[in-house]
Image (tube, grey):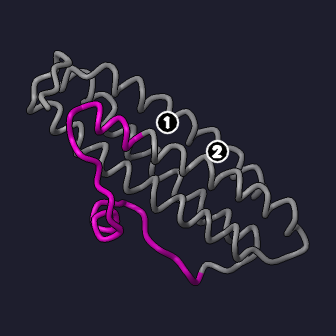
Amino acid sequence: MKTTISIAAEHREVVAHQLATLLADEFVLSTKTLRAHWNLEGPDFHSMHRYFEELYQQATDRADQVAERIRQLGHYAPASLKTFLQLTHLTEQDDAGNDSLSLIRVLLQDHESIIEFIRGTLGEMQSAHKDAGTSDFVTALLEQHEKTAWMLRAHLQ
């Protein structure tokens, strides 16, 4: 089906690729957050188990929203683990420890990495590719990651 949204096909393709990378990051982050939720140990287990579940649900929702934005641009969202691992900026870390502070450090680093990626692509989406809609969408995701990073950072003070 032809996508007619007043953005040139070549611009939609570039933006869709940037979003595919973001989708991979969000998917890997949701998996790492789920790992934290499942494997957490320590005296703060109950409260942090619930907190990590909330973060996992937020990450899953963001991934879904990014995939749907890719479809709105007329492209298919990547949907395989192999592709996500090829596209992501994040790394898997199974040896980070299972206490809340160790897990928080890993997740904070990931949120900050995603913030950096979004900031690096945001201006280009609107100015070079004429996609104000995706720029606004990604700005909202940026704000969510900044808030979560702040909250994670507060645990480490």
Q: Residue 128's spot in the image, x, y percent?
A: 17, 25
**The N terminus appears in which quarter of the rendering?**
top left
**Callout 1–callout 2 Cβ contact below 8 Å:** no
SS type, badge 2: helix
Secondary structure of the residue carrying tag 1 is helix
Q: Which residues make up the magenta segment?
A: 66-95
Spot occupied by residue 137 in the image (x, y as percentages of width and height): 42, 28
Amino acid marked by disc 2:
Thr
Is the C terminus in the top left, top right, bottom left or bottom right quadrant?
Answer: bottom right
- The residue to which callout 2 is attached is 148
- Give the amino acid type for the residue marked by disc 1 in the picture: Leu
Per the rendering, the mark at residue 107 is none
Q: Residue at 69% of width from left, 52% of height from top?
A: 152
The earlier-in-sequence mark between 1 and 2 is 1
User: Image check: 78 left or right of 142?
Assistant: left
Q: Is residue 153 left or right of residue 7?
A: right
From the top left corner, tell me how far across and down residue 89 is, in percent.
37, 60
Question: Which numbered disc covers residue 142?
Answer: 1
Residue at figure coordinates x 79%, y 57% from the top left = 50
Q: Nearer the viewer, residue 76 or 103?
A: 76
Residue extending farthest to the bottom is 95
**How many residues crowd around disc 1 within 10 Å: few (fewer than 14), some, or many (20 or more)?**
many
